[in-house]
Image (cartoon, rainbow, N blue to C red):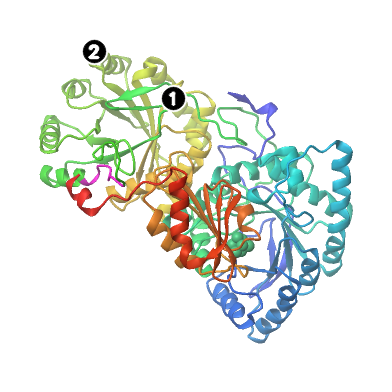
Amino acid sequence: MKDMHNILAYCRSPYTFGRRRTREVTVGIGPNGPVTVGGDNPIRVQSMTTTDTRDTEATVDQVVRLVNADCEIVRITAPKIKDARNLGVIRNELTARGVQVPLVADIHFLPSAAMEAAEYVDKVRVNPGNFADRKVFAMREYSDAEYEDELERIDATFRPLVLRCKELGRAMRIGTNHGSLSDRIMSRFGDTPDGMVESALEFVRICEAYGYHDIILSMKASNAGVMIAANRLLVARMDAAGMDYPIHLGVTEAGDGEDGRIKSAIGIGSLLEDGIGDTIRVSLTEEPECEVPVCIDLLGLRSERPVNGDTTKESHARAYDPYAFTRREAACVLLGGNGTGASEPIRVATHIEFESEPVETLARDVETLVAQPRFDGDPDPKSADGHDGAEIISVAVSCDADLERLRALQVSLPEHRFTWTARMAADPVLAQKSVGLVDIIDVSINGDDNLTDATIEALLATSGSSGLIMQWRFKLRSTSGERQDYVALEEQVRRLAEKSPANRSIIAIEGRDIISAVRYLADRGAAGTLPLLLSVTHDGPGAALLHCSVQLGSLLCDGLGDIVEVHDGGGRRSSLRLAYNILQAAGRRITKTEFISCPSCGRTLFDLQTTTERIKSKTGHLKDVRIAIMGCIVNGPGEMADADFGYVGAGTKRVSLYVGKECVERDIPEDAADDRLIQLIKSHGRWVAPISTEALLNA
Ligand code: SF4
């Protein structure tokens, strides 16, 4: 357990919502007047065009579509001076069409392009990893004097832009990307959240030295956990230095579809729950206007985000390090053929009810919950220990008849390695009758229950004599997050955890909003070393996929949770798939190919959406392989982070292939690139053949 006195604090309290107070930075004029970021202003929604910046008509059309979708700030890439100059033409055309929206120039590498762009746009985004540095992936030791010399060199390169932006009243985003830190930062800090934060602060200090404060900062990564840690650390460092700059949030190269939305929700949503973030972008490999509704839905998950003026930081012992991933320590509990807690994979559970469906229907349904084999060579295709099937099935049991139905259900199912749970009220007699039928007795405890010591002892006696696992389930009643609710909850959890054997008991927390309660319990060690089951239910307004992703993903990135359960309102199969996808996006359990694809921009050299779909269809069956699909060779290799293999646009209809950060095949024709990528994966021993339909039917 960490002492918060020794950890820089990033929010007032991890249990009570309070939006961080930041200074206001105006970034231009929108349809309804000035668009100001930070302060008490709404959290702003932004996106980026994907057209060639010199194609004025296509770019203006796309900006108009974004504005019509309620995008408040639009970024446009300016790779060269000619592109930067065309931003003025784009601005004039938008004005002629009666469209007012703040424009941001996205700059990598060329200070001259930034200087040109500053003449026409409202904000200039610079990447401190490549504004004054050409990345050569060279690691060397810098003495303090050499490092100082480097900072002076950066000052000389960056100062003209700072002074020009100040003179013109332009805002600036200093936007760090995890994958494109300078060699200098990498050499001293590595590609760590520390390095990301320092990379930005070096530029901030230069801005401040010249009296320029219209700054917004961002810390982006394709790994949601790294992005969360870097932003928290940024806030802690800024607060310690008396800086109050607004923050832009985004997960880079999140991909497309459900996976892209889940990853973004985990990164952005977790930080919004921390009260961090003044403007957001959801980067998807889709049309840019598809990003806007996702941003709006994410912001809608918490309807009010008032700024909390109280900047006093509460001091807590913490169960987890908010700046680096560590999994909470928990005892190993064996569940039939699987284990949970300790270093076991995070397990996935689902729930069925007898009252709504006959046993025959349920049996057919449960068959579909078995893990689907995905490739030849799966040692046990019917195993529930992998891929996307239920590993634990809980059944609501309230009477003898339910136990008979459970028996009939199990008889009607062929052999599967499910762990069965009987979910019931605190009923020692029913628990005793469940022995031999299930592996876990799940006792639901509602706030008003008066669970006597005698009842607890009787239940534990059954568990002790039969080897059954006891699971104490706490259903959160309110979403208010009031401190007094957590105090009472802590008492109940601690009482049961202290009585329960560590290697045969689990604490389950169920509710719609569970983040604060689970953090509170973990920080106080209320559950001891018992594994934690996190159960999230989406039963109200708002987007289910985003809500469940934020609630579970945030806790998983904090290292909390050993079993997860999702009820997204879309049925068992949908809930299971979402649970596995959240685990994958949070980086906690990898069960399918991980695709990292950039959202594309004016630099993109091929159709990123169709290319991504095509490569996914050929490699999507692989397990535990990360493939990056990046639109350009200028930023792609740097930003594809920890991908195993990279497919990167190298020129018109030309592609370069990477293994890690190393380019192994240069400039090959696009129509041969897919096969060469597969060959590359095979030659590194990471390929398995997709399972045939026939094999699937016979499995
Ligand atoms: S990697 Fe993709 S989004 Fe990034 S600059 Fe290149 S083409 Fe644009």
**CB contact under 8 Å: marks 1 and 2:** no
Which mark identifies residue 307?
none
Residue 664 picture location, percent across and down: 57, 52
Q: Is residue 450 visible?
A: no
Q: For the point 28% across and 51% down, which residue is it? A: 571
Which mark identifies residue 342?
1
In this rendering, the answer to whether 227 lies above or below 450 is below
- Count residues near mark 2 (Cα–Cα under 10 Å), then give few for <14, some for 14-19, many for 20+: few
Q: Which residue is mark 2?
A: 465
Residue 73 picture location, percent across and down: 64, 67
Which residues make up the magenta segment?
368-374
Give the structural element (helix, strand or loop) at label 2.
helix
Q: Name the amino acid, label 2.
A: Ser
In this rendering, the answer to whether 675 lies above or below 601 is above
Give the structural element (helix, strand or loop) at label 1.
loop
Q: Is mark 2 within 8 Å of ligand 1?
A: no
Which of the 4 quarters of the picture holds residue 338? top left
Camera-near label (1 vs 2) is: 1
Task: Please identify the dominant SS of the magenta region.
Answer: loop
Position of residue 458 in the picture relative to residue 91 (left or right): left
Q: Nearer the viewer, residue 281 or 381?
A: 381
Q: Nearer the viewer, residue 30 or 491?
A: 30
- Count residues near mark 1 (Cα–Cα under 10 Å), then give few for <14, some for 14-19, many for 20+: some
Q: Nearer the viewer, residue 392 or 294?
A: 392
Q: Name the amino acid, label 1.
A: Ala
Position of residue 37 in the picture relative to residue 624 (left or right): right
Residue 675 picture location, percent across and down: 43, 59
Based on the picture, tell me whether residue 497 belongs to the magenta stretch: no
Which of the 4 quarters of the picture holds residue 393? top left
Q: Is residue 467 visible?
A: yes
Q: Earlier in the sequence, mark 1 or mark 2?
A: 1
